[in-house]
Image (spheres, grey):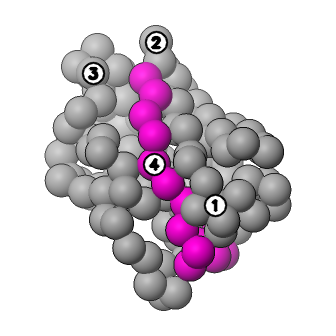
C-alpha cells in the first residue's frame, strides 16, 4: 500500500540534522529548522489513509518514504510502532532513534536530513515541489 502527497522546498532548507527529517504544513522556514526538508504540505499525519495508518501504528512494520524532486529521488527505510499516535496537526517527523511523540511518522530510519541525496537537497533549496510517497 502507498500514499503520496506534495510539499515544497524552501530557500532555507539546510538538511543538516543528523537524527531526523521533517515535513510540515508551515509555509515558512527559518534558518534554525535544519531538519525540515518540506514545507507547505496540505497533508497531515491525520490525512494518511486508515489502512496505512493502522500498519504504521504496528510494531516492526517496514515503512519506505520516497522523496522525489525534479532532479533526484531518495528512499528512506524505517519502522512503525504501536506507540505512534499519528495525530500532530502540522508536522511529520522521521527519526533514526526509537523516540515517539505525536509528530513521529516512523522510527529507526536509515537516514536523516543530513544523509539525503545532495541533488535532492539542492532542488529543495530552490523551492521545487517535493513528492512524498509512504509505502507499507
Residue 95, image x, y percentages: 50, 56
Residue under numbered circle 1: 124
Upstream in the sequence, badge 2 or badge 1?
2
Q: Position of residue 125 (x, y in %)?
A: 65, 68
Callout in the foreground (2, 4): 4
Q: How would you rate the neighbour count of disc 2 (Cα within 10 Å): few for under 14, some for 14-19, many for 20 or more?
A: few
Q: Which residue is mark 2?
A: 1
Segment colored magenta: 3-18
What residue appears at the point 43 percent right and 76 percent down from the top-left corner?
Answer: 29
Which residue is located at x 30 percent, y 45 percent?
42
Residue 27 position (above or below residue 8): below
Rounded to the nearest angstrom, the CA distance separating label 3 from label 1 is 26 Å
Please tell me whether mark 3 or mark 1 is closer to you in this view.
1
Mark 3 / mark 4, whichever is N-terminal? 4
Q: How far is the residue under mark 3 from the one under mark 4?
A: 17 Å
Within the magenta stretch, is there residue 110? no
Evaluate if marks 3 and 2 touch, with contact meaning CB atoms under 8 Å apart. Answer: yes
Q: Secondary structure at mark 4?
A: strand
Secondary structure of the magenta portion, mostly? loop
From the viewer's perspective, is 57 left or right of 105? Answer: left
In screen coordinates, is 74 left or right of 89? right
Mark 3 is surrounded, within 10 Å at the Cα level, by few (under 14), some (14 to 19) or many (20 or more) other residues, namely: few
Question: CB atoms at circles 2 and 4 under 8 Å apart?
Answer: no
Whichever of callouts 2 and 4 sits on the residue coming sooner in the sequence is 2
Relative to 43, 133 lies left or right? right
Tag 1 or tag 3, which sits nearer the N-term? Answer: 3
Task: Please give the residue where the numbered disc 3 appears in the rendered image.
Answer: 49
Amino acid at each position: 500500500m502507498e500514499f503520496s502527497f506534495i510539499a515544497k522546498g524552501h530557500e532555507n532548507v539546510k538538511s543538516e540534522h543528523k537524527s531526523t527529517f521533517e515535513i510540515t504544513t508551515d509555509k515558512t522556514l527559518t534558518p534554525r529548522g535544519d531538519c525540515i526538508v518540506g514545507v507547505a504540505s496540505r497533508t497531515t499525519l491525520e490525512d494518511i489513509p486508515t489502512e496505512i495508518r493502522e500498519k504504521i501504528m504496528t510494531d516492526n512494520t517496514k515503512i519506505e518514504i520516497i522523496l522525489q524532486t525534479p532532479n533526484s529521488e531518495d528512499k528512506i527505510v524505517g519502522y512503525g510502532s504501536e506507540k505512534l499516535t499519528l495525530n500532530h496537526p502540522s508536522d511529520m517527523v522521521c527519526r533514526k532513534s526509537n523516540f515517539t511523540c505525536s509528530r513521529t511518522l516512523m522510527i529507526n530510519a536509515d537516514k536523516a536530513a543530513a544523509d539525503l541525496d545532495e541533488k535532492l537537497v539542492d532542488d529543495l533549496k530552490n523551492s521545487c515541489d517535493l513528492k512524498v510517497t509512504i509505502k507499507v
